[in-house]
Amino acid sequence: MLIAKSQIKITQYHTTKYLCKSSTAITRDPSRFSISHQNLTIVAGNALDPASVVDVVKDHDAVLSAIGTSGSSVEVIADAARSLIEGLSQVGIRRLVVVGGAGVLEVEPGVEFVDSPNFFEAYRPLGLVHRQAYNLYKTSDLDWTFVCPAAEIAPGERTGKFQVGADRLLTNEKGESRISAEDFAIAFVNEVETPQYIHHRLTVAY
């Protein structure tokens, strides 16, 4: 298992949940990766460079991608999608599970959240580039899953109790769409261990 990351907090929850398996984390700066574990190898690499992807993904059965935009342009999301598709295709690794964005989820048939008036305006550029990345994965030959959080995600409790669905933004009886980072990580890793949504969007919410 290989975990491709930029500086994104939620990856820590993914990594901690999955460390019963032998895993490799790729990051530009290993000194800033705060998790250590006997089953985790941390290597320097660049998920935006297909050659670097090829070099580090060899001998892995799947790749988890949690590329963030901290300190970078939002375009890094689409650039990473192109790089991962090219690199994984070169070495014949098909399984890719990606942290996506809620903006690509539908709020009604044919209307994605990023295009609705209820989408947070400050995050619209990020939502649009997540859609660009999602469309890139859709046209690839990889066995991808695009795992989208609820409209609101933040550190909180690990409850293990949440809705799971495909394609459509999930809400509770009050119309709220939210999930903790900890429970999102559970759903993410569940899809890695027991694939149910290959070639689909997957989302979770309370």
Image (cartoon, helix red, strand yellow):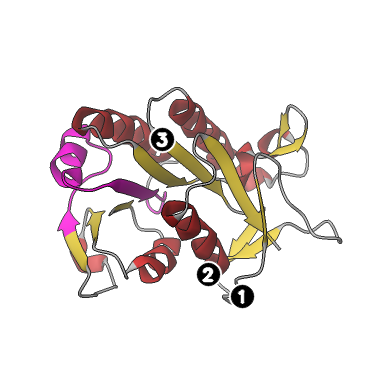
Q: Residue furthest right?
A: 174
Q: Amino acid at mark 1?
A: Thr
Q: Residue at x 32, y 47 (%)?
A: 63
92 or 12, which lies in front? Answer: 92
Residue 123 in percent (x, y) is at 60, 46
Nearer-N-terminus badge (3/1) = 3
Residue 12 position by quadrant: bottom left
Q: Which mark is residue 143?
A: 3
Residue 46 in the magenta stretch? The answer is yes
Q: Which residue is mark 2?
A: 182
Q: Which mark is residue 159?
A: 1
Q: Specify start and end residues of the magenta stretch as a single range.
A: 43-71
Q: Residue at x 17, y 40 (%)?
A: 52
Regarding mark 1 in the picture, which secondary structure is present there? loop
**How many angstroms separate mark 3 from mark 1 (CA)?**
29 Å
Q: Are marks 2 and 1 in contact (CB under 8 Å)?
A: yes
